Image (spheres, rainbow, N blue to C red):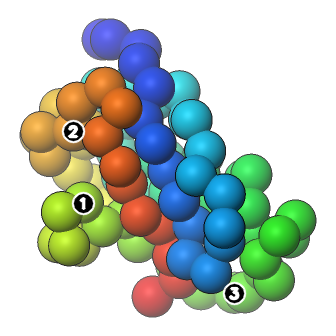
Amino acid sequence: MALYPVQGIFDNDFVVMLIPIDDADPMSVVAEKVAHHAAGRRVAPQSGPLQVRFHGQVLAETATVADAGVAPLDVLQVGYR
């Protein structure tokens, strides 16, 4: 287990955030961590599942940060499906 920061941006937000994640976190947890700082604050909250995109590819909810090859300071995009 390794804790490190990634850059997270939520769809329709203008702020790129530095979010601490663990390499064992599944993408569902990563999505919630990023959404926590944007949805309901600068972006209107919506119902429905979240998804994480990395290099333009949607990552499976169960894929871990390590499985996806996400490194410190990489950029993850999060939004509603």
The quadrant of the image that shows the N terminus is: top left
Label 2 belongs to which residue? 70
Q: In the picture, residue 11 is in which quadrant?
A: bottom right
Q: Earlier in the sequence, mark 1 or mark 3?
A: 3
Residue plotted at (58% across, 52% down) = 16
Amino acid, disc 3: Ser
Distance of mark 2 from mark 1, alpha carbons? 8 Å
Furthest-right residue in this view: 41
Judged from the image, the secondary structure of the residue bearing numbered disc 3 is loop
- Nearest the camera: 35 or 28? 35
Nearer mark to the viewer, of 3 and 2: 2
Label 3 belongs to which residue? 47
Query: Residue 72 bears which disc, if any?
Result: none
Judged from the image, the secondary structure of the residue bearing numbered disc 1 is strand
| Residue 32 seen | no
Q: Earlier in the sequence, mark 2 or mark 1?
A: 1
Amino acid, disc 2: Val
Amino acid, disc 1: Phe
Q: Are marks 2 and 1 in contact (CB under 8 Å)?
A: yes
Left or right position of 1 against 56: right
- Nearest the camera: 29 or 38? 38
Q: Quick check: 18 above or below 10? A: above
- Nearest the camera: 2 or 77? 77
Judged from the image, the secondary structure of the residue bearing numbered disc 2 is loop
Residue plotted at (66% across, 71% down) = 13
Q: Quick check: 68 above or below 23? A: below
Residue plotted at (87% across, 65% down) = 41
Label 1 belongs to which residue? 54
